[in-house]
């Protein structure tokens, strides 16, 4: 049974489960998918570890996280998108990763925009940031299409990154 968090016109975003290790592993097998992320998944056990130690705890701790993205109505797995709390920066980070055959079809923008809306409307977040390497033009375009504003470039986790931000327009000031 899918625990659907967000439904858009074309997509379903649901919580991952421990049974999704193969989906994570398959997604990360393509070197082009992980070209700018610097976090290849070594094997199926590593994929399970990522789910158990990184993805699933976010749901319990913060009521959000990275969600599995499926195409309606076939329920084909496209990748993931969602929000992640980064305690080292004390921020909520928007992230997404999709299989290459689904690039350029607007799915990342659709899922990312829905994640931002969820963060603001359901979680009452004040701000959401998004980052991508300067060379990752497609990812930067997604952030811009979602209404995020460029706020600077710097080093994050040892890599150059452009940082974008969007503020909740309805946040009580």
Image (tube, rainbow, N blue to C red):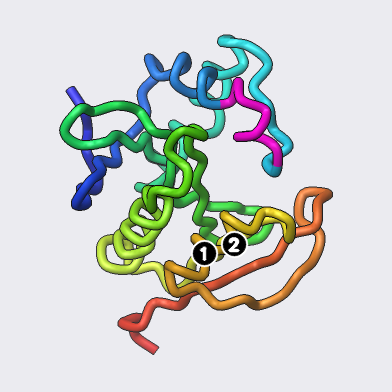
Q: Measuring 59% from the left and 70% from the top, which residue is drawn there?
A: 164
Neighbourhood count class around disc 1 (C-alpha, 10 Å): few under 14, some 14–19, many 20 upward:
many
Which quadrant holds the N terminus? top left
For label 1, the SS is helix
Q: Measuring 38% from the left and 39% from the top, which residue is drawn there?
A: 67
Q: Measuring 24% from the left and 48% from the top, which residue is drawn there?
A: 6
- Of residues 61 and 161, the one nearer the viewer is 161
Q: Position of residue 162 (x, y in %)?
A: 70, 65
- Give the residue number, with chain letter if any, for mark 1: 143
Quadrant of the image occupied by residue 16:
top left
Q: Position of residue 118 (x, y in %)?
A: 30, 59
- Give the residue number, with chain letter if any, for mark 2: 140
Neighbourhood count class around disc 2 (C-alpha, 10 Å): few under 14, some 14–19, many 20 upward:
many
Quadrant of the image occupied by residue 23:
top left
Q: Position of residue 88 (x, y in %)?
A: 68, 54
Q: Measuring 26% from the left and 61% from the top, which residue is drawn there?
A: 122
Q: Which residues are magenta?
A: 28-35
For label 2, the SS is helix
């Amino acid at each position: 049974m899918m625990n659907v968090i967000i439904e858009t016109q074309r997509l379903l975003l649901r919580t991952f489960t421990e049974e999704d290790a193969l989906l994570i592993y398959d997604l990360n097998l393509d070197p082009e998918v992980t070209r700018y992320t610097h976090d290849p998944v070594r094997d199926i056990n590593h994929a399970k570890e990522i789910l158990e130690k990184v993805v699933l705890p976010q749901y319990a701790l913060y009521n959000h996280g990275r969600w599995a993205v499926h195409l309606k109505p076939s329920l084909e797995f496209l990748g993931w998108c969602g929000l992640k709390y980064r305690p080292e920066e004390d921020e909520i980070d928007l992230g997404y990763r999709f299989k290459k055959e689904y690039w350029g079809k607007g799915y990342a923008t659709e899922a990312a925009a829905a994640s931002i809306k969820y963060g603001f409307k359901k979680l009452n977040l004040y701000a959401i940031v998004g980052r991508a390497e300067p060379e990752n033009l497609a990812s930067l375009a997604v952030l811009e299409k979602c209404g995020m504003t460029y706020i600077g470039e710097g080093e994050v986790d040892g890599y150059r990154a452009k940082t974008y931000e969007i503020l909740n327009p309805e946040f009580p000031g």
